């Protein structure tokens, strides 16, 4: 894809005037962080490396089963951040499509996905994608039953408003999870009960002193 094709496809205004007013116009992440605090819906911690670490673990063969589990699935990433690794994971796994739910950095993330598609034009299979500037609970409540696979990386308790909110997200994960799909919770405190779960730890390739825990949940 050329730069021109990308700029035709990507219109920041697609992200609504409300998003632009609250977040898009602020280039400095600290301002976005303060606004997210005032709204009380979650914490716009820029994070960064959690989804990347999962992607690298899968690509290096440490968690191969994730690739086959995502094949053909509609993949929804909660709190997707600013970087395109969730898209890259879904595309490399031949997922049906990828939807990133990111209330505070949706503009930055959209650009980052387009940039990856442009840079890896031939190397990465292209799948349809969308980035939406919504709260994760609100988004999941609008999904149908048994339809999606879900990824959450770096969504620790300190990111979410409170325990009650987290329980509601967990209930929605169970309701919306496809019977053949997976919920992948990596370095994350979202831990729905009553599903089958496998757990593994891996060291980051870039920084082996950091370890991540991946939990893979399936419907029984
Ligand atoms: C620690 S960061 C992890 C980002 C990304 N997964 C990564 O590893 O690069 C947590 C992310 O959750 C997002 N977030 C916070 N509250 C949220 C909410 N209520 N709904 C959806 N995302 C939220 C933040 O904006 C931030 O991008």
Image: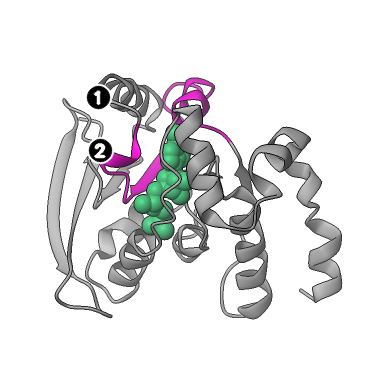
Instruction: Check mark 1 vs ligand 1: CB closer than 8 Å? yes or no.
Output: no
**Which residue occupies the foreground of this view, 98 or 84?**
84
Residue found at x 77% / y 51% = 12
Quadrant in which the N terminus is drawn: bottom right
Label 1: which secondary element: helix
Q: CA distance from mark 2 to mark 1?
A: 8 Å
Can you tell which quarter of the image residue 220 is in?
Answer: top left
Query: Which residue lies under the disc numbered 1?
Result: 163
Asked if 216 appears above or below 39 in the picture, the reply is below
Label annotation for residue 157: 2
Q: Sequence order check: which comes first, mark 2 or mark 1?
A: 2
Give the quadrant of residue 56: bottom left
Q: Nearer the viewer, residue 15 or 20?
A: 20
Cβ of mark 2 under 8 A from ligand 1 = no
Residue at image coords 24%, 64%: 63
Question: Hey, which quadrant is residue 52 in on the image?
Answer: bottom left
Tell me, yes or no, if residue 29 can be seen here: yes
Residue 136 inside the magenta-drawn segment: yes
Tell me whether the residue at label 2 lies in contact with that at label 1, contact meaning CB atoms closer than 8 angstroms.
yes
**Where residue 66 appears, x then y in whole percent?**
31, 57
Q: Which residues are magenta?
A: 134-160
- Percent position of residue 165, x then y: 33, 22
* Residue 177 magenta: no
Q: Which residue is at the front of the view, 116 or 19? A: 19
């Amino acid at each position: 894809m050329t730069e021109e094709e990308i700029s035709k496809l990507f219109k920041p205004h697609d992200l609504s005037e409300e998003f632009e007013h609250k977040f898009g116009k602020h280039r400095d992440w600290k301002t976005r962080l303060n606004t997210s605090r005032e709204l009380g819906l979650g914490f716009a911690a820029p994070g960064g490396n959690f989804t990347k670490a999962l992607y690298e673990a899968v690509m290096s063969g440490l968690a191969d089963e994730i690739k086959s589990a995502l094949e053909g699935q509609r993949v929804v990433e909660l709190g997707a951040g600013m970087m395109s690794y969730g898209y890259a994971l879904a595309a490399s796994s031949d997922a049906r499509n990828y939807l990133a739910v990111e209330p505070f950095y949706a503009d930055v993330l959209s650009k980052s996905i387009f940039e990856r598609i442009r840079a890896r034009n031939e190397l990465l299979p292209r799948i349809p994608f969308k980035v939406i500037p919504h709260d994760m609970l609100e988004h999941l409540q609008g999904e149908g039953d048994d339809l999606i696979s879900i990824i959450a990386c770096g969504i620790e308790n300190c990111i979410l408003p409170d325990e009650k909110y987290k329980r509601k997200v967990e209930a929605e994960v169970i309701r919306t999870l496809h019977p053949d799909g997976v919920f992948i919770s990596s370095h994350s405190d979202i831990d729905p009960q009553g599903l089958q779960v496998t757990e593994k730890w891996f060291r980051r390739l870039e920084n082996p002193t950091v370890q991540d825990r991946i939990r893979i949940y399936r419907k029984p």
